[in-house]
Amino acid sequence: MVETTEKKSVRPAGILPDRAQPHNLKVEQAVLSAMFRDPKGCIDTVISKLGPTGDAFYGAANRSIYSAIVELHRSDSIPDLLSVAQKLHSSEKLEAAGGEIYLAEIYSAIATAVNVESWCDILRNYAMLRRMIDACSGALIKCYDNDADPDKLVEEIETDIYKIRTAGATETIRDLRMLVAQEFQTLMDIQNRNIEVGIPTGYAPLDDFTGGLKKGEMFVLAARPSIGKTSLGLNIISNVAIKGANRRPVAFFSLEMTDNQIARRLLCAESGIPESVFWNGAFNDTDMVKLTDAVTNIRDAQLFIDPTGGLTISELRAKARRLKNEHDIQLIVIDYLQLMHADARIDSRQQEVAEISGGIKKLAKDLDIPVLVLAQLNREIDKNSSANARPKLAHLRESGAIEQDADIVTFLHRNRDDAKNLPDGASTEAELIVEKNRNGKTGVVKLNFFPSRMLFEAAPPVGREYAPGGDA
């Protein structure tokens, strides 16, 4: 049998220098033999499992033979022993690949190709281990660089590991008949309330429009300053992570408020006690009972708060991936987009916001969870219109890319003057405008805003004009 050359990799001195990386040459030969013996039944299967490059093969000879088979298959030639030998000979690789004797040895390595998919899984697992070794070895080398930026290095390492983790998650071609049957069953399950379309926001009229917060989608909640977008975002977080029996882990990246401010805001909203009672000395025994009950209710919630200011998109990705792996978070909330920064210095703020917006959308798809991102509107609506003028997509501050990337764009709208000098417990009217909905209808949801509690509630009764299909 020909001596095969191991695949070279970067490895720091002293890191198991004499130990071969994980591999199984017998299984590699078995896969190649299956491709020779049953080209019609095996080649496409193997390529779909291992890819076209041959990186899953450890032996250099086996990689060369695999590449020759793939090239011949692409040209619609049948890769038998003679054609593969000729292909290797023309590229001056036949001798290095063991010659015709080794090709014949491979051909006779198995009696049947029935287990070829299992063999491919074995090779793919070994390849993943080798990529891990290469990534970790490379990381060690970078750590010896005195000029290395630790934060950037951690992001690079986490990105490499995440790529390895998801490398095997390849999409496959699906038969439309199977897809239609599956989607029909999904629709029936939705109709019978057996499954949720998305995570309920706690605002039923809004969920009627959007189906809730759906996996892989970027949901934008935008408003002018001091309208209450952070309060509504926290209300939704509370509905998802704290209230009800079906609580879900949530990650909240707050670039504007501190973690203590957020915790205090959530406590007051959950207990129904205005923050003002703590400052004006009106706190009483009844309030203490309510506050204690709120602490008990919140204590078991899985809400992870990151108050880092000036967060970059790479830092967001790294932290979100870690929270997904460790706590299986089901929702990410960001407050707010325009306070974030791109990874590299970009002269144009519009280009920077576009990079941030695209990165958030990609994060939602990669983690397959919804991302609720708060955004600020520009001042043009105040300059050119009355106080009650409703915002439009053109008012999204600094970038049209937000409109392009987002699956759903909503605007929180109310007249700020209506909330002035309201007594505790009183409310004012507000609207949540569903301006863009990639997979559904647009319209308006009526809300009541309680300034003393920083709380938004759906306005009862909900008229037909605010339901999907109505004249919103």
Image (tube, rainbow, N blue to C red):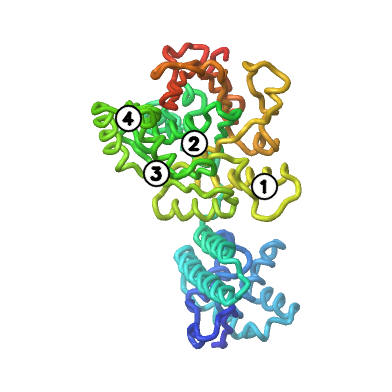
Q: Would you name the residue on which mark 1 appears?
A: 355
Q: Would you name the residue on which mark 2 appears?
A: 214
Gap in Å between the C-alphas at discs 2 and 1? 22 Å
Do the CB atoms of the residues marked 2 and 1 lie less than 8 Å apart? no
Label 4: element kind: helix
Residue found at the far front of this picture: 281
| Residue 298 in view here | yes
| Mark 4 closeness class: few <14, some 14–19, many ≥20 residues within 10 Å | some
| Mark 2 closeness class: few <14, some 14–19, many ≥20 residues within 10 Å | many
Identify the amino acid type marked 1.
Answer: Glu
104 horizontally vs 117: left or right? right
| Location of residue 219 with respect to 456 vertically, above or below | below
Q: Where is residue 224 in the image (x, y as percent from the top left)?
A: 61, 28
Residue nearer the viewer, 172 or 350? 350
Indicate the quadrant containing the C terminus: top left, top right, bottom left or bottom right: top right
Q: Would you name the residue on which mark 4 appears?
A: 271
